[in-house]
Amino acid sequence: MRWALIGASTIASQYVIGAIRAQADGEVVRLVSGSAARARQYAADHGIAESGTDLDQALSDPRVAAVYVSSTNEKHHEQAMAAIAAGRHVLCEKPLALTLEQAQAMVAAADAAGVVFATNHHLRCSGSHRAMRALIAEGRIGRVLSLRLFHAVHLPENLRGWRINDAGAGGGVIPDITVHDADVARFLLGEDPVSVVAQMASTGMGDGVEDSAMSVWAMPSGAMVMSHESFTHPFAGSGLEVHGTAGSIFARGVMTQRPVGEIELVTAAGREAVAYPDHDLYAQGLAEFHAAVRGEGRPAATGRDGVKSLAVALAVREAARTGTRQAVDYGA
Ligand code: NDP
């Protein structure tokens, strides 16, 4: 399947171009950027034959079957809508859009056009998260009481642009990382947060947007989720814990882009290391996307999953802004 990339981005260069090329039939044939010079350089660096700034021209290329949108967040909606209107399958970066209405419109348009539309929530593609989900589903920890998500990172120098200083581009840690944590909670627990309380802060990097957030989410089952995201923590490390009536899961270093980290299951029987497959997260997501286009199953994270993760993130930001509990609005 031949892909066009929209966005000369770091994530495409570090992970997604390789993940596309890891598919037996995966090929990147075009790149669209906002800058002609940047498009040329990026295409040359990554061996992409065609590049330019004209989105319509790229979308009218009959070879292009699928489009990967990884521009800054405020552009996702318009670019994905154009790709869908051109009848292309779309893998879109998170957050799908800046508003719930925009994200819902993208899903509705893809449904109407009959194209595959997916969200690039990579963590649910990891062997570690799938192993933990299976433990929970098999009842190994009993009834889930709580989930604690630790996702405070230290943003690398090269990513300290729009993410930390441009609200209009969709900057801030909540659209960047809380959306992923919302997807992880939904994926592990199989239910959607109902309401949230939250605080956010700027702790050294954020300039006009938050660089840190802590929130607590209520789940329909009664389970509670505690979620911490930040750009400013050099040594915190990532992880998650799921606590149930019959056991606890402790995972360290698993909220990352690579198949790393350790999982331990603790029950009355003792402590047990949990093994998991170490496949590439992004290649797995691409494999499931390619399969969905062939009519075999659904993408790892659908467009609706992207709408829901955005809905949770929007509720967290509103809760933090207003200092009030917010019901999560998933739309109609
Ligand atoms: P980048 O800042 O690297 O790229 C975003 C855009 O910024 C590019 O499309 C490009 O615009 C422009 N740009 C990038 N580098 C430069 C530069 N050196 N000079 C001038 N302009 C530049 O962002 P990311 O790759 O980190 O993120 C892109 C999207 O992917 C976001 O939506 C983000 O949320 C998402 N993301 C998802 C991840 C995941 O694991 N699912 C991980 C990381 C990011 P143009 O295309 O116009 O040239």
Image (tube, rainbow, N blue to C red):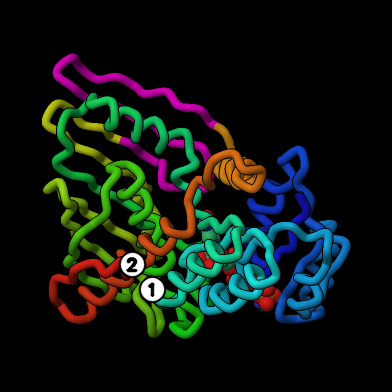
Percent of width and height locating residue 191: 26, 48
Percent of width and height locating residue 165: 46, 81
Q: Nearer the viewer, residue 313 or 296?
A: 296
Residue plotted at (60% across, 70% down): 80
Residue beneath label 2, please? 311
Badge 1 element: helix
Q: Residues within 10 Å of mark 1 (few under 14, many from 20)?
A: many
Residue beneath label 1, please? 100
Which residues, given as a range, are shown in magenta?
A: 251-278
Choose top left, top right, bottom left or bottom right for residue 251: top left
Percent of width and height locating residue 274: 37, 24
Q: Quadrant of the C terminus?
A: bottom left
Residue plotted at (38% across, 85% down): 208
Q: Nearer the viewer, residue 75 or 14?
A: 75
Badge 2 element: helix
Q: Is tag 1's residue or tag 2's residue first in the polypeptide sequence?
A: 1
Residue plotted at (47% across, 50% down): 301
Q: Please give left or right for residue 88 compared with residue 54 in the image.
A: left
Quadrant position of ligand 1: bottom right
Task: Count numbered badges in the picture.
Answer: 2
Compared with residue 124, is residue 132 higher up or lower down, i.e. above or below? above
Percent of width and height locating residue 134: 35, 30
Q: Please give left or right for residue 49 compared with residue 98 in the image.
A: right
Compared with residue 253, is residue 198 higher up or lower down, i.e. above or below? below
Marks 1 & 2, CB-CB < 8 Å contact: yes
Q: Please give left or right for residue 127 compared with residue 21 in the image.
A: left
